Amino acid sequence: MHELSLLENVRVILEDHAKKQNFQRVEEITLEIGALSCVETEALAFAFEAVMKGSLAENAQLRFKHIDAQGRCLSCGQLTVMEMLYDACEHCGHPHVDVVSGLEMKITELKVS
Amino acid sequence: MCGICGCSNPSGTGKFSVVDASKVSLLTTHHHNHGNEQHSQADNQRLIQVELDLLSKNNAYAAENRAYFQNNKIFVLNLVSSPGAGKTTLLVETIKVLKDKFPIAVIEGDQQTEHDADRIRATGVSALQINTGRACHLDAHGIGRAVQTLKVKSNSFLAIENVGNLVCPSSFDLGEAHKIVVLSVTEGDDKPLKYPDMFYAADVMIINKIDLLPYVDFDVERCIDFARRVNPTIQILQLSATKSDNFSEWTDWLIAKMQ
């Protein structure tokens, strides 16, 4: 359940950011989560309310923006869609693909007051 | 479901929603009733675009650790595996072979008990046990504090034995030089595909307990093929820590890294 630790990180990040950008409350948080990142959005959503309780993001709405994963084939060099880290190249079938995107776990947007 | 912000019911009491990129831009004009609260553009709300990694706090501590390790010439390995793959035995046997060559220290991570640290201390090497309690992994902040408590010497080898778990420790950089994933032949040979994040994050895979191969249904070549599908550059060692089979391959690798 490392989602709990990640959310505790989010809470600290928001507190730091509130000082820098001068806001008191967070109303909405948008998280960008890649298809190959190792978090479950359902687990994040489940723990979110409990972790944010008593913080400046209590009652904030959590939103997810899903990022598709892509890799570059180490044989033919083309970009290929990935759903798993071990997916082969969709063009030539080569088993070794370098991940280009899809590992993201970021806060990208905050609605604050 | 609210068609604008995606909150989970019409009265707006939902706390999360799944949206796609095209809908997120609509947030700027969002204006409707959320339960008892009326919120709109008018009440001092503003949107901030940010780029903050969820692991940024941990990564900052990990970068501090890494700088400290480099400045003090401490070579650090982060050992990860499922429970029971043989990490502690591997460390105990490694210490027996190498403890006269350079200083060694060990940080042990488990949810509870001092058992593993006690096994390490029995070899004469200093060890610190971190009990993570409810947490399923070690984090970089805890490692930074442990290194100060242990007073790890310069020019030494520091082994961090992570909590037995093939999922969570993969995301948490501790500042180590390499993650080493240990997989024993009493487990399934398809573990690299079942838990790809860990095998993707590791630089070296140790296949342990190879003395038991005649008694188990574990296909080494299949396992290596699966690991390389996830991570084409992963280095692979096959050994038995208890019977010392191929053990020098591992200790030679470590000695070379220490130079």
Image: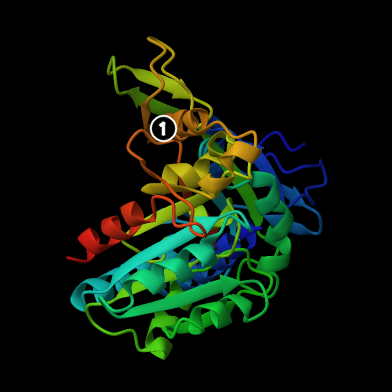
Report the front residue among B218 and A92: B218
- Residue B106: where, in percent of width, then height? 43, 76
Identify the residue at the far top of this view: A92
- Residue B36: where, in percent of width, then height? 81, 59
Crowd rating for badge 1 (residues with CA inside 10 Å; few <14, some 14–19, many 20+): many
Quarter of the image with the C terminus of chain A is bottom right
Q: Residue at x 55, y 31 (%)?
A: B219
Report the front residue among A86 and A32: A86
Colour basis = rainbow
Circle 1: residue type? Arg
- Residue A72: where, in percent of width, then height? 33, 25
Q: What is the chain identity of the residue bearing mark 1?
A: B
Residue A101 lies, with reference to residue B160, above or below; the image says above
Q: Quadrant of residue B100?
A: bottom left
Provide the secondary structure element on which disc 1 rests: helix
Q: Residue at x 69, y 39 (%)?
A: B6
The residue singled out by tag 1 in the image is B228
**Would residue B111 appear left or right of B89 to someone viewing this image?**
right
Quarter of the image with the N terminus of chain A is bottom right
Report the front residue among B254 and B16: B254
Q: Is residue A12 visible?
A: yes
The number of callouts visible is 1
Q: Residue at x 52, y 62 (%)?
A: B87
Residue B148 lies, with reference to residue B197, above or below; the image says below
**Would residue B46 appear left or right of A49 to someone viewing this image?**
left
